Amino acid sequence: MSDTRVRTVLVVGATGRIGRLVVAAALRHGLDVRALVRDTKRAAGVLPGATLVPGELTRAADLTAAVAGVDAVILTHGSAGYGARDLEDVDYGAVANLLTALDGRRVRVALMTSINVNERSGAYQDVLDWKRRGERLLRASGLPATIVRPGWFATLGATNQAVALEQGDT
Protein backbone atom coordinates (compact mmCIF):
# COMPACT_ATOMS: atom_id res chain seq x y z
CA MET A 1 0.00 0.00 0.00
CA SER A 2 1.41 3.41 -0.95
CA ASP A 3 1.77 6.29 1.47
CA THR A 4 -0.79 8.96 0.54
CA ARG A 5 0.08 11.53 3.17
CA VAL A 6 0.90 15.01 1.97
CA ARG A 7 4.38 16.06 2.98
CA THR A 8 5.38 18.65 0.37
CA VAL A 9 2.99 21.27 -0.96
CA LEU A 10 3.40 23.96 -3.59
CA VAL A 11 1.48 27.19 -3.02
CA VAL A 12 0.82 29.32 -6.10
CA GLY A 13 -0.23 32.85 -5.19
CA ALA A 14 1.73 32.52 -1.96
CA THR A 15 2.50 36.23 -1.46
CA GLY A 16 -1.15 37.30 -1.75
CA ARG A 17 -3.52 37.90 1.17
CA ILE A 18 -4.86 34.34 1.18
CA GLY A 19 -1.65 32.68 0.01
CA ARG A 20 0.28 34.03 3.00
CA LEU A 21 -2.28 32.50 5.36
CA VAL A 22 -2.11 29.18 3.51
CA VAL A 23 1.70 29.08 3.70
CA ALA A 24 1.66 29.87 7.41
CA ALA A 25 -0.99 27.21 8.13
CA ALA A 26 0.86 24.56 6.11
CA LEU A 27 4.09 25.31 7.96
CA ARG A 28 2.28 25.09 11.32
CA HIS A 29 1.11 21.62 10.28
CA GLY A 30 4.69 20.53 9.64
CA LEU A 31 4.52 20.46 5.85
CA ASP A 32 7.44 21.23 3.57
CA VAL A 33 6.13 24.32 1.78
CA ARG A 34 7.28 25.57 -1.60
CA ALA A 35 6.09 28.92 -2.85
CA LEU A 36 6.10 29.90 -6.52
CA VAL A 37 7.09 33.58 -6.48
CA ARG A 38 8.05 36.22 -9.01
CA ASP A 39 10.23 38.25 -6.64
CA THR A 40 12.29 36.15 -4.20
CA LYS A 41 13.61 39.18 -2.29
CA ARG A 42 10.11 40.45 -1.55
CA ALA A 43 8.79 36.96 -0.81
CA ALA A 44 11.60 36.18 1.64
CA GLY A 45 10.28 38.90 3.92
CA VAL A 46 6.68 37.68 3.93
CA LEU A 47 7.09 33.90 3.67
CA PRO A 48 9.60 32.86 6.34
CA GLY A 49 10.07 29.11 6.43
CA ALA A 50 8.91 28.44 2.88
CA THR A 51 11.22 27.31 0.08
CA LEU A 52 10.97 29.98 -2.59
CA VAL A 53 10.83 28.83 -6.19
CA PRO A 54 11.20 31.70 -8.67
CA GLY A 55 8.83 31.57 -11.60
CA GLU A 56 5.70 32.68 -13.39
CA LEU A 57 2.47 30.74 -13.26
CA THR A 58 1.86 31.77 -16.86
CA ARG A 59 4.80 29.60 -17.98
CA ALA A 60 4.33 25.83 -17.78
CA ALA A 61 8.12 25.31 -17.73
CA ASP A 62 8.38 27.32 -14.50
CA LEU A 63 5.67 25.21 -12.92
CA THR A 64 7.39 22.01 -14.06
CA ALA A 65 10.37 22.78 -11.84
CA ALA A 66 8.13 23.89 -8.98
CA VAL A 67 5.98 20.72 -8.89
CA ALA A 68 8.88 18.25 -8.92
CA GLY A 69 8.39 16.02 -5.88
CA VAL A 70 5.29 17.72 -4.45
CA ASP A 71 2.33 15.78 -3.08
CA ALA A 72 -0.16 18.64 -3.38
CA VAL A 73 -0.66 22.02 -5.00
CA ILE A 74 -2.73 24.87 -3.60
CA LEU A 75 -3.70 27.58 -6.09
CA THR A 76 -4.67 30.88 -4.46
CA HIS A 77 -3.70 33.03 -7.43
CA GLY A 78 -5.80 35.60 -9.20
CA SER A 79 -5.30 38.10 -11.98
CA ALA A 80 -4.27 41.60 -10.98
CA GLY A 81 -5.83 43.26 -14.01
CA TYR A 82 -9.07 42.97 -15.82
CA GLY A 83 -7.80 42.74 -19.37
CA ALA A 84 -9.08 39.71 -21.28
CA ARG A 85 -5.57 38.37 -21.91
CA ASP A 86 -4.59 38.67 -18.23
CA LEU A 87 -7.75 36.89 -17.12
CA GLU A 88 -7.25 34.02 -19.53
CA ASP A 89 -3.51 33.68 -18.89
CA VAL A 90 -3.78 33.80 -15.11
CA ASP A 91 -7.20 32.65 -13.93
CA TYR A 92 -7.47 29.85 -16.51
CA GLY A 93 -3.91 29.51 -17.79
CA ALA A 94 -2.39 28.70 -14.40
CA VAL A 95 -4.60 25.60 -14.15
CA ALA A 96 -3.75 24.56 -17.72
CA ASN A 97 -0.03 25.13 -17.08
CA LEU A 98 -0.16 23.15 -13.84
CA LEU A 99 -1.72 20.17 -15.61
CA THR A 100 0.94 20.40 -18.33
CA ALA A 101 3.69 20.61 -15.72
CA LEU A 102 2.36 17.58 -13.83
CA ASP A 103 2.49 15.55 -17.04
CA GLY A 104 -0.01 12.97 -15.81
CA ARG A 105 1.40 12.72 -12.28
CA ARG A 106 -1.38 12.51 -9.71
CA VAL A 107 -1.23 15.03 -6.91
CA ARG A 108 -3.94 16.60 -4.80
CA VAL A 109 -4.98 20.05 -5.97
CA ALA A 110 -6.90 22.79 -4.17
CA LEU A 111 -8.11 25.68 -6.33
CA MET A 112 -9.50 28.91 -4.94
CA THR A 113 -11.78 30.70 -7.38
CA SER A 114 -14.65 32.99 -6.41
CA ILE A 115 -18.22 33.00 -5.22
CA ASN A 116 -20.76 33.41 -8.04
CA VAL A 117 -18.72 31.76 -10.80
CA ASN A 118 -21.97 30.22 -11.99
CA GLU A 119 -23.64 33.59 -12.44
CA ARG A 120 -24.16 34.52 -16.07
CA SER A 121 -24.28 38.30 -15.74
CA GLY A 122 -22.81 41.09 -13.69
CA ALA A 123 -19.95 43.53 -13.47
CA TYR A 124 -17.28 40.84 -13.03
CA GLN A 125 -18.53 38.41 -15.68
CA ASP A 126 -15.20 38.19 -17.54
CA VAL A 127 -13.33 37.32 -14.34
CA LEU A 128 -15.89 34.74 -13.28
CA ASP A 129 -16.01 33.13 -16.74
CA TRP A 130 -12.25 32.44 -16.74
CA LYS A 131 -12.31 31.18 -13.15
CA ARG A 132 -15.19 28.82 -14.03
CA ARG A 133 -13.24 27.55 -17.05
CA GLY A 134 -10.26 26.85 -14.77
CA GLU A 135 -12.54 24.86 -12.44
CA ARG A 136 -13.89 22.83 -15.34
CA LEU A 137 -10.41 22.07 -16.60
CA LEU A 138 -9.32 20.86 -13.16
CA ARG A 139 -12.41 18.66 -12.81
CA ALA A 140 -11.86 17.18 -16.27
CA SER A 141 -8.27 16.26 -15.33
CA GLY A 142 -9.48 13.58 -12.94
CA LEU A 143 -7.02 14.70 -10.24
CA PRO A 144 -8.21 14.60 -6.64
CA ALA A 145 -9.31 18.20 -6.23
CA THR A 146 -11.01 20.63 -3.90
CA ILE A 147 -12.46 23.83 -5.27
CA VAL A 148 -13.03 26.67 -2.82
CA ARG A 149 -15.28 29.58 -3.77
CA PRO A 150 -14.80 32.21 -1.09
CA GLY A 151 -17.01 35.27 -0.85
CA TRP A 152 -15.43 37.94 1.30
CA PHE A 153 -12.78 35.57 2.60
CA ALA A 154 -10.00 38.11 3.08
CA THR A 155 -12.08 40.91 4.55
CA LEU A 156 -12.89 39.43 7.94
CA GLY A 157 -11.09 41.32 10.66
CA ALA A 158 -8.48 39.79 12.93
CA THR A 159 -11.09 39.50 15.69
CA ASN A 160 -13.62 37.62 13.52
CA GLN A 161 -12.63 33.97 13.60
CA ALA A 162 -15.95 32.57 12.37
CA VAL A 163 -16.00 30.26 9.37
CA ALA A 164 -19.17 29.56 7.40
CA LEU A 165 -18.94 26.59 5.04
CA GLU A 166 -21.81 26.23 2.61
CA GLN A 167 -22.43 24.32 -0.59
CA GLY A 168 -22.90 26.27 -3.82
CA ASP A 169 -22.81 29.98 -4.46
CA THR A 170 -24.47 31.20 -1.30
Image (cartoon, helix red, strand yellow):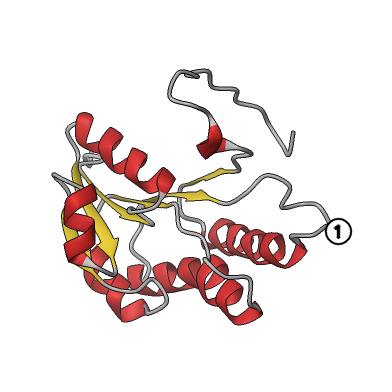
Q: Is residue 36 visible?
A: yes
**Image location (x, y in percent) of residue 140:** 58, 61
Image quadrant where residue 103 sits: bottom left
Position above or below: 148 against 122? above
- At mark 1, the secondary structure is loop
Quadrant assignment, res 70: bottom left
Amino acid type of disc 1?
Ser
- Give percent across and percent down for residue 123: 79, 59
* Residue toward you, 93 or 155: 155
Would residue 5 be visible to someone looking at this image? no
Mark 1, residue position: 121
From what the image shows, is residue 153 above or below residue 130?
A: above
Query: In the visual, does 116 lie left or right of 97?
Result: right
Above or below — where is 33 with respect to 79? Answer: above
Tell whether 116 sits left or right of 160.
right
Image quadrant where one finds the C terminus: top right
**Residue under the point 33% across and 53% down:** 14
What is the x, y in percent for residue 141? 52, 62
Q: Position of residue 1 (x, y in %)?
A: 23, 38
Binning the other alpha carbons within 10 Å of mark 1 as few (below 14), some (14 to 19) or many (20 upward) gives few
Residue shown at the point (48%, 66%) measured from the top left = 95
Q: Which of 40 and 132 is in front in this view?
A: 40
Residue at image point 23% right, 57% down: 43
Indicate whether 52 appears above or below 102.
above
